Amino acid sequence: MELLLDVNNLSITFKSKEKTVHAVRNVSFHVNKGEVLAIVGESGCGKSVTAKSIMRLLPEKTGRIMDGSIMFDGKEITTMNKKELVKYRGDRIGMVFQDPMSSLNPTMTVGDQIAEGLMIHKGYKKKKAREKAIELIRQVRIANPVHCCTKYPHQLSGGMRQRIVIAMALICEPDLLIADEPTTALDVTIQAEILNLLKELQEKMGMAIIIITHDLGVVAKFSDRVNVMYAGEIVERGTLREIFYHPQHPYTLGLLKSIPKLDHDFCEKLAVIEGSPPDLSILPKGCAFSERCSHAMDVCDQYHPEQFDQSSTHQVSCWLTDSRASRAPRVYSITH
Amino acid sequence: MLQFMFRRLIGAVITLFFIITLTFVLMSAIPGDPFTSDARVPEQVLDNLRDHYGLNDPIMVQYFKYLKGALFLDFGPSIKWDNQTVNELIATGFPVSAILGIQALAIAIFFGILLGIIAAFNHNKSFDYMAMIIAILGLSVPSFIFATILINFFAIKLQWFPVATWGTWQHSILPSIALAVAPMAYIARLTRSSILEVLSMDYIQTALAKGVTGYRFIIVHVLRNALIPVVTILGPITATILTGSFVIEQIFGIPGLGKYFVEGISDRDYPLILGTSFFYSAILVFFVILVDIAYGVIDPRIKLIKGRD
């Protein structure tokens, strides 16, 4: 496996006049060439911020990478100047945003928007770029691509727009695609179609994908590895099987339990994780999840959990997995 | 498009009808007539004069005469300006006003947008504050004060430009600037706020994520979207410039249409008032339609052809 993206000890803060929010704290992860990594977590856990920081798309005035490194294909992104950065954006790394309704330029035809990447990065002339754009529109399965090419975003449906956004991100055949909640704004049937499409294109083009989502169904569908984020930290990481069948962190377990099941008794309430995430402007002393954790021990409030290896691919930041906590019930045993 | 034009044309005719009717009513309500003066003129002479210009006719007859004039675009002879018809006066005054207005409009649009762009891309930095202070000054200082300052500084002290009157191209510069200042300030403020709004949009993030930069980013992705509200106010801006020219033409002693219009009112030169106000209204209505068309061109979401797409 060849390493493509290596993020180490990344910390990002947002400053306003009143307070400093530590949105991402000490996050490390990597993506190999051609694999799919999912970053899962609830709203505000820092997953989108992490994704945007890879593109250096954080708001310049408020958001700042305080510490850590982002190595893409052996090059450091955090210290790049604008000129170098622009060569990566769109060419080597593509990005799909959450809301296809607002992420397309309303005054440009979709064909031009897709072709633009080729004209910037590959120096294509307009006509040739447009031909390739039409080819790609066909590949994202839009009927009558030649006609579609000349349409404006408002003339297309939500699902079609997201296909256009995907085509736009893929036109330069990037090595890495960052999909920031690509299906959240779409209705369920379209969600499945878009995911299948992404999967298919990934297999065809062989790029790596980072998929950011709060939907574990999306994760199960096509990721190789999963990072679970909570309050700006990665609390558990592992392969798809490890996370779904042997979750070690109580938060991961809570997420899995809260998925409604088909054979669910409708009189019963859905499982929820009580409480809400901590205010990230005040750093918690111990584990950020301890307040909401039903397995919390005294140590959890006092000391930040270390990272414990479960296997070479599976790491958890939870005191329950410490050998000294042997008397505490193992989380995964609770699942069964 | 044709259907749209036709609809707008009918709307324009109705608008103009209301404007000329209102003008006529207001004009008739002003006490006095063109022959009211300090000089003692025998009553019989005055009566003959009124008869000659049809001012002794019943008011409705005068009104329909005037409507007929508007319909055939013939407003008859001026009362004040001997041997000249209103149409001739408009024909002499309008080219002068048009040059002044077009120059002012060009200055206002060009520098307004430029100032707005620079301010927006330096948001909350010193240049932004500076540009906005200039804009607020430009909006709040009346044009006649500004005109006086310009004359005093550039014409009298520096002697770069002639003080007043009309003739060469140099004559037109100071009045054009004086006329352009307020609309320019307005355009600058609107451009700035509109750009700032566009910059916060998701599609700007998309553009950045594609690696779009520089000229292409500013023109294609930001300005194209940010200028839509600016285009809409060009109609009202044209009105500001038209009415602004009344004052400016007086100050600079320019023989334009605005001068005839203002003097027409103080002289109670009824045909001239009606003719010039009809003419001004027609220009304004024309510009509003023009702006609507431009709006459809710049914003693909607005379709003029069949109402909705």
Image (cartoon, helix red, strand yellow):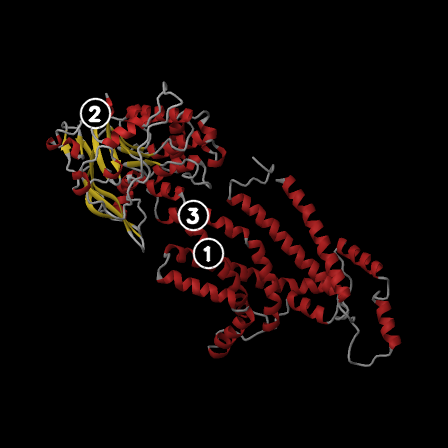
Residue occupying image coordinates x 75% and y 69%: B268
Residue A96 or A38: which is nearer the viewer? A38
The disc label shown at residue A332, or none? 2
The kind of residue on which mark 3 rests is Val
- Mark 2 falls within which chain? A
The kind of residue on which mark 1 rests is Ile
Q: Is residue B55 left or right of residue B245?
A: right
From the viewer's perspective, is residue B34 above or below residue A117?
below
- Residue B212 position, x and y percent, is 35, 44
From the viewer's perspective, is residue B23 above or below residue A35?
below
Q: Which marked residue is nearer to the observer: mark 3 or mark 2?
A: 2
The kind of residue on which mark 2 rests is Tyr
Which residue position is annotated with label 1? B113
Q: Is residue A179 left or right of residue B74?
A: left
In the rendered structure, are the residues bearing label 1 and label 3 in contact, judged by CB atoms less than 8 Å apart? no
In the rendered structure, are the residues bearing label 2 and label 1 in contact, judged by CB atoms less than 8 Å apart? no
Task: Work out how far the residue at label 2 is from the one at label 1, CA to CA, in angstroms.
Answer: 63 Å
Count of residue discs: 3
Q: In which quadrant of the rendered image does the N terminus of chain A lie?
A: top left
- Residue B91 position, x and y percent, is 68, 62
Residue A142 or A290: which is nearer the viewer? A290
Task: Work out how far the residue at label 1 is from the one at label 3, CA to CA, in angstroms.
Answer: 15 Å
Residue occupying image coordinates x 64% and y 66%: B258
Task: Work out how far the residue at label 3 is from the one at label 2, CA to CA, in angstroms.
Answer: 49 Å
| SS at mark 1 in the image | helix
Q: Which marked residue is nearer to the observer: mark 1 or mark 3?
A: 3
The answer to which quarter of the image holds residue A132 is: top left
The answer to which quarter of the image holds residue B309 is: top right
- Residue B105 position, x and y percent, is 54, 59
| SS at mark 2 in the image | helix
Which residue position is annotated with label 3? B198
In the rendered image, residues at marks 1 and 3 fall on the same chain = yes
